[in-house]
Image (spheres, rainbow, N blue to C red):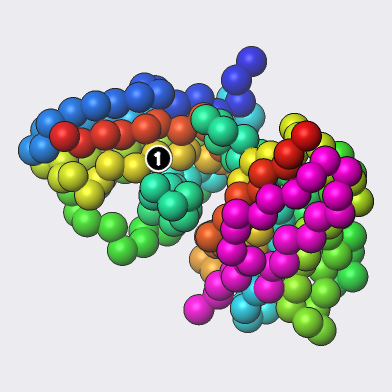
Amino acid sequence: DTAVSQTPKYLVTQMGNDKSIKCEQNLGHDTMYWYKQDSKKFLKIMFSYNNKELIINETVPNRFSPKSPDKAHLNLHINSLELGDSAVYFCASSQAEVRGEAFFGQGTRLTVV
Amino acid sequence: GDSVTQMEGPVTLSEEAFLTINCTYTATGYPSLFWYVQYPGEGLQLLLKATKADDKGSNKGFEATYRKETTSFHLEKGSVQVSDSAVYFCALTQNTGGFKTIFGAGTRLFVKA
């Protein structure tokens, strides 16, 4: 069973489109995250949700909007896609009192053309 | 703010060579420290962790010791294998109103047969 799963794995789309990436975890964790990894492998946190509540919102364009319908799901919607949004997006989850050990999904490679 | 600095790569070694990847951190309080590994085309996996000073994390022949006096968490392995080729990320986690994991820039390791 996959612990943290994201869909789609690959996403190619044109500038200006709106797209969503979905994430689900079956670990019973209470905290979920979105990270962006650029072409140089640098990882930056974008958002964190704890029990469906947004707790970390880094400096991210407001074209990016996370949504957590329940604590097992955290989706990322991106409006008006730009070339610079091309990256690999990773979803992760953790249990808060385990001091932050995170489990990552396989990533979604987004290419904006 | 909190930060993690790790040695730039790529690091290229022959099989059975000794590996060290340096990692230092800046943080207020008492963070937990982690090493994650990312194999090609995959998400990050936790390799080892240490939650307090002088703790040693170990897994799969890799080791790292939490050194508060030098704010370091260097990764070592006595004899690397080709299968260890991957990108290694040093990370810290603090509870700053939500557990936030900050990653270093990643170090790519190539092991030649």
Which residue is farthest top? A1
Q: Quadrant of residue B91?
A: bottom right
Residue A99 horizontal/vertical position (percent): 69, 56
Residue A41 lies within the magenta run: no
> Which quadrant of the figure contains the C terminus of chain B?
top right
Residue B79 horizontal/vertical position (percent): 89, 46
Neighbor class of circle 1 (other Cα within 10 Å; few <14, some 14-19, many 20+) is many
**How many discs mark residues in the rendered view?**
1
Query: Looking at the image, which is closer to me, A28 or A17?
Result: A17
Chain containing the residue with disc 1: A
Identify which residue is drawn at 75% across, 49% down: B13
Identify which residue is drawn at 62% across, 35% down: B39
Residue B112 horizontal/vertical position (percent): 73, 39
Q: Quadrant of residue B71?
A: bottom right
- Residue B103 seen: no
Residue B16 lies within the magenta run: yes
Disc 1 marks which amino acid?
A: Tyr
Residue B21 horizontal/vertical position (percent): 73, 61
- Residue A9 seen: yes
Identify which residue is drawn at 24% across, 27% down: A12
Which residue is farthest left? A16
Identify which residue is drawn at 60% across, 20% down: A2
Taking A96 as reference, is A106 above or below it?
above
What residue span does the magenta drawing correspond to?
B1-24
Residue at disc 1, secondary structure? strand
Query: Looking at the image, which is closer to me, B64 or B7?
Result: B7
A5 to the left or right of A13:
right
Q: Which residue is mark 1?
A: A89
B42 to the left or right of A85:
right
B111 to the left or right of A40:
right
